[in-house]
Amino acid sequence: MSYGFGFVENVQDNLGQTVSIFTTSGGQSGSGFTGVLANANNDFVRLVNQIGQGPGCALGNCCDSFGGHDGYNEAGMNCGRNMLGTVVDIPYNRMAAFVHNAVGSHW
């Protein structure tokens, strides 16, 4: 951690934390993004705002009784769909506000 005093350093001090970032754009993106701060360099930040699902056939749990209703097995596991996560990259020059918890941050 950098524990600096500038805006970029403040953002970098929150790596691994859940944050919200509001942007200067309109529409849905202007409503802000919330996710885990995964990366923050000198140009942009990267938020993971939807975690993808793990493999469905680990240790035979999903593949043994495939054929459940609508792609799910009897245990309710997703057995046929690929649930990908989502990531958003936001340039600093498009940020309107950076919101983070006071507890655990170094402000």
Image (cartoon, rainbow, N blue to C red):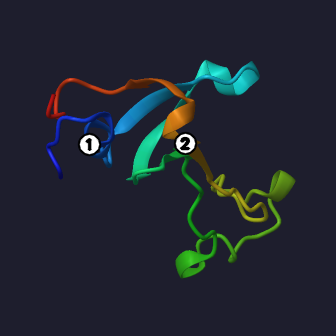
Which residue type does callout 2 highlight?
Pro
The answer to which of 23 and 36 lies nearer the viewer is: 23
Count of numbered circles on the image = 2
- The CA span between labels 2 and 1 is 15 Å
Q: In this view, does 104 lie to the left or right of 6?
A: left
Q: Residue at x 14, y 34 (%)?
A: 106
Against 25, residue 50 (above or below) is: below
Residue located at (69% from left, 76% from top) = 63
The front one of 99 and 67 is: 99
Q: Nearer the viewer, residue 33 or 98?
A: 98
Residue 59 image position (x, y, % from top left): 53, 80
Q: Is mark 1 on a helix, strand or loop?
A: helix
- Helix or strand or loop: what does disc 2 sit on? strand
Taking the view exactly as shown, the residue that stands out farthest to the bottom is 59
For badge 1, the amino acid type reads Glu
Q: Is residue 15 above or below residue 56?
A: above
Residue 13, image x and y in percent?
Answer: 24, 43
**Residue indicated by mark 1:** 9
Left or right: where 17 falls relative to 3: right
Q: Is residue 103 left or right of residue 62?
A: left
Residue 105 lies, in percent from the top left, at: 19, 33
Q: How crowded is mark 2: few (under 14 residues within 10 Å), some or many (20 or more)?
A: some
Circle 1 packing at 10 Å, graded few (<14), some (14-19), many (20+), is: some
Q: Residue 91 carries which label?
A: 2
Looking at marks 2 and 1 on the same chain, the residue that comes earlier in the sequence is marked by: 1
Say left or right for 36 vs 24: left
Q: Compared with residue 35, is residue 64 higher up or lower down, i.e. above or below?
A: below
